[in-house]
Image (cartoon, coloured by chain):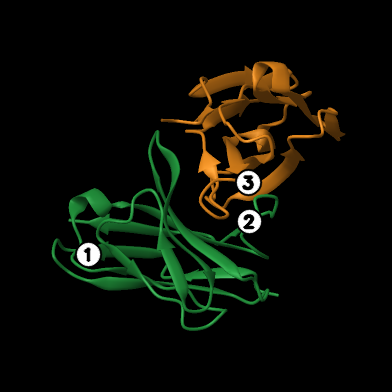
Chain colours: A orange, B green
């Protein structure tokens, strides 16, 4: 059963718009980590953030912010004032304490297109 | 540090051929893994290794073999390539197999099986 759901397959925005990428996860573990990775058109995977299950503080890094809510099992990612360079596929991933050692469970990704 | 390197970057095979995708890391990471990425499927774990001499299967291991004779290298072997193995393959490494470790990914190998 899929444990990370990114319901938005593709999103298209115009530059300077704010955009939120949704991520819903499912796990029975009390200790787990959530990650976001960016995959630009060049193809590599770039680590963006890691959040553990005991830390529900929101995180802000420049134009990026993350909203972790255990009550709704969500870990959403917002880009403020989007730029063309933000165009990429974004993956949310889950790592469980009780899962296959070190295994990252990925969502299917959300393709973000930012148009000038 | 070169990080995680993969070779080749692109490969075309005919059905039935065998080949090895190379992966190396210079960060002295214990944990290494292979994922495949297919359109609309995200990344799925093929095999992983928690240290030299120790490997195990992931979600989609059929048709692939791995071995880990050194800490640095983790090659992925396709025994008899099939069109269903057309995919982008990513190797990753992390300090350990603990769930909190960030995984570092290689640049990927794009494989086409005709």
Is disc 1 placed on a helix, strand or loop? strand
Q: Secondary structure at mark 3?
A: loop
- Would residue B17 be found to the left or right of residue B25 on screen? left
Q: Position of residue A18 (x, y in %)?
A: 74, 18
The residue to which callout 3 is attached is: A97
Mark pair 1, 3: CA separation: 38 Å
Give SS at disc 2: loop
Q: Total label count?
A: 3
User: Who is closer to the viewer here, B49 or A46?
Assistant: B49
Q: Quadrant of residue A62?
A: top right
Q: How far is disc 2 from disc 3 in space, using C-alphas?
A: 15 Å
Alpha carbon distance from label 2 to label 1: 29 Å
Residue B75: % across, % down: 41, 73
Horizontal arrangement in the rendering, residue A69 relative to residue B105 (left or right) = right
Please tell me which residue lies in front, B71 or A92.
B71
Q: Where does label 1 land, which residue?
A: B13
The residue shown at (55%, 21%) is A11
Q: Residue at x 58, y 45 (%)?
A: A98
């Amino acid at each position: 059963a899929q444990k990370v759901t990114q319901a938005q397959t593709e999103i298209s925005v115009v530059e300077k718009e704010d955009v939120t990428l949704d991520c819903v996860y499912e796990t029975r573990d009390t200790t787990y980590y959530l990650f976001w990775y960016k995959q630009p058109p060049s193809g590599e995977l770039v680590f963006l953030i890691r959040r553990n299950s005991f830390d529900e503080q929101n995180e802000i890094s420049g134009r990026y912010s993350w909203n972790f809510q255990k009550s709704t099992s969500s870990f959403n990612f917002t880009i403020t004032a989007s730029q063309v360079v933000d165009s990429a596929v974004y993956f949310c991933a889950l790592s469980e304490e009780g899962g296959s050692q070190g295994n990252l469970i990925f969502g299917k990704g959300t393709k973000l297109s930012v148009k000038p | 540090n070169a990080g995680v390197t993969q070779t080749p970057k692109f490969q075309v095979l005919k059905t039935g051929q065998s080949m090895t995708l190379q992966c190396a890391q210079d960060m002295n990471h214990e944990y290494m893994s292979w994922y495949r990425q297919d359109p609309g499927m995200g990344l799925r774990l093929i095999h992983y290794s928690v240290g030299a001499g120790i490997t195990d299967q992931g979600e989609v291991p059929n048709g692939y073999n791995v071995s880990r004779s050194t800490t640095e290298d983790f090659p992925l072997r396709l025994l008899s390539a099939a069109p269903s193995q057309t995919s982008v393959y990513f190797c990753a490494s992390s300090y350990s197999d603990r769930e909190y470790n960030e995984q570092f990914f290689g640049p990927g190998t794009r494989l086409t099986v005709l």
